[in-house]
Amino acid sequence: MIVGLTGTFVQTWFFMLAMWLLNQPEKGSVLFYVAFGIGFVCEMIPNYLFSNWYTFGTRPDWKNAGGFLFARAVNLAIQFALLPFMLRLLPTWREDYLSLAVIFFAGIINYLILLLFFKKPKNENIQS
């Protein structure tokens, strides 16, 4: 949960920073989604490392990196599909609150996919 919340915080912070740097583009505009994508990409590196070390107790390797990228692609597709729907459904909500709700939902799906790729090796101590 801590890794997921950290990733959500990092993504939301970079999204809000990008929104500010892009002069607060209108909801649903191309620049709005650019800002959202920037937050998503900036969150990937710490999320991958923390997922290995803390969530699954594994070491980074090619198999879990590929699984991580697959899960993140699904996560991004969910976010890009769900965010416009939520913006239309709840037009009076602030976009940063809506993005946070979408990020949280997609994060749960992401975790479930990662369970398939991050398996702790038998009899290996990652501290050594």
Image (tube, grey):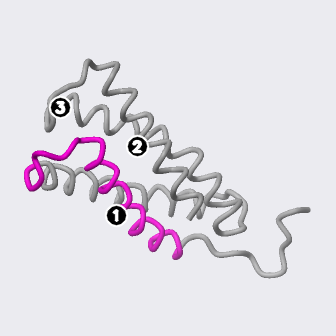
Report the amino acid beneath label 2: Phe
Horizontal and vertical percent position of residue 69: 47, 55
User: Is residue 74 found left or right of 117 in the rendered image?
Assistant: left
Q: Which amino acid does label 1 sit on?
A: Phe
76 with respect to 117 (left or right): left
Discs 3, 2 touching: Cβ within 8 Å: no
Give SS at disc 3: helix
Q: In which quarter of the image is the C terminus?
A: bottom right
Which three-letter amino acid code belongs to the residue tagged 3?
A: Val
Q: Name the residue under label 1.
A: 105
Rendered location of residue 25, percent (x, y): 20, 25
Q: Which stretch did the figure color magenta?
A: 88-116
Residue at 59%, 64% (x, y): give it.
Answer: 63
Mark 1 Cα-neighbour bin, 10 Å: few <14, some 14–19, many ≥20: some
Q: Distance between the residues labelled 2 and 1?
A: 14 Å
Residue 18's spot in the image, x, y percent? 36, 27
Q: Mark 3 points at which residue?
A: 30
Can residue 52 be found in the magenta stretch?
no
Question: Which quadrant, please, contains the N terminus?
Answer: bottom right
The secondary structure type at the circle numbered 2 is helix
Q: Nearer the viewer, mark 3 or mark 1?
A: 1
Q: Which mark is residue 40?
A: 2
Closer to the chain start, of discs 3 and 1, is: 3
> In the rendered image of this protein, does residue 61 appear above or below residue 87?
below
